[in-house]
Image (cartoon, rainbow, N blue to C red):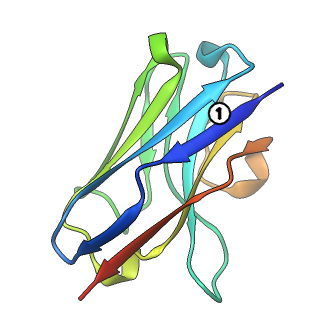
Amino acid sequence: EVQLVESGGGLVQAGGSLRLSCAASGFTFDDYAIGWFRQAPGKEREGVSSIKGSDGSTDYADSVKGRFTISSDNAKNTVYLQMNSLKPEDTAVYYCAADSFGLGHLWTESYDYWGQGTQVTVSS
């Protein structure tokens, strides 16, 4: 059974940092891509970043480039999202998701499995 469990969310002031973790189980990590998405109240879920298990290549939404960094520890089947220089507009529920085709796109339709999400709140 595929499981994705996010952790690391919380409340932080603008300009601060958080690191989210996504612990994955039930599949061969190297064959998948893992994506981070977020959904703010009243808005659609949007892609934030992704990483391919096969070669570690990454992708970022323009809104987070230069501030967020995605990484993985394949031995631990865990993907991290380091978020620096946080802004109030980064406030959202953050989800990690697994793409069984390993493509690593930043649209929700590409992903088969989803975690429950973790809340990130950035105060001004």
Describe residue 93's horizontal placement relative to residue 67 as left or right. Answer: right
> In the image, what residue type sits under mark 1?
Leu
* Residue that mark 1 sits on: 103
Image label count = 1
Residue occupying image coordinates x 73% and y 18%: 27
Residue in the foreground of this view, choosing between 33 and 38: 38
Residue 10 lies, with reference to residue 96, above or below; the image says below
Describe residue 105's horizontal placement relative to residue 65 as left or right. Answer: right
- Quadrant containing the C terminus in the rendered view: bottom left
Residue occupying image coordinates x 78% and y 28%: 2
Residue 123 lies, with reference to residue 120, above or below; the image says below
Residue occupying image coordinates x 40% and y 38%: 80
Query: Which secondary structure lies at badge 1?
Result: loop
- Quadrant containing the N terminus in the rendered view: top right
Describe residue 51's horizontal placement relative to residue 28 as left or right. Answer: left
Residue in the foreground of this view, choosing between 30 and 11: 11
Residue 14 lies, with reference to residue 83, above or below; the image says below
Residue occupying image coordinates x 80% and y 41%: 112
Give coordinates of residue 5: x percent, y percent. Answer: 61, 40
Give coordinates of residue 15: x percent, y percent. Answer: 15, 72
Badge 1 crowding class, 10 Å Cα cut-off, few under 14, some 14 to 19, many 20 or more, is: some
Give coordinates of residue 50: x percent, y percent. Answer: 51, 42
Describe residue 66's horizontal placement relative to residue 27 as left or right. Answer: left
Give coordinates of residue 3: x percent, y percent. Answer: 72, 33
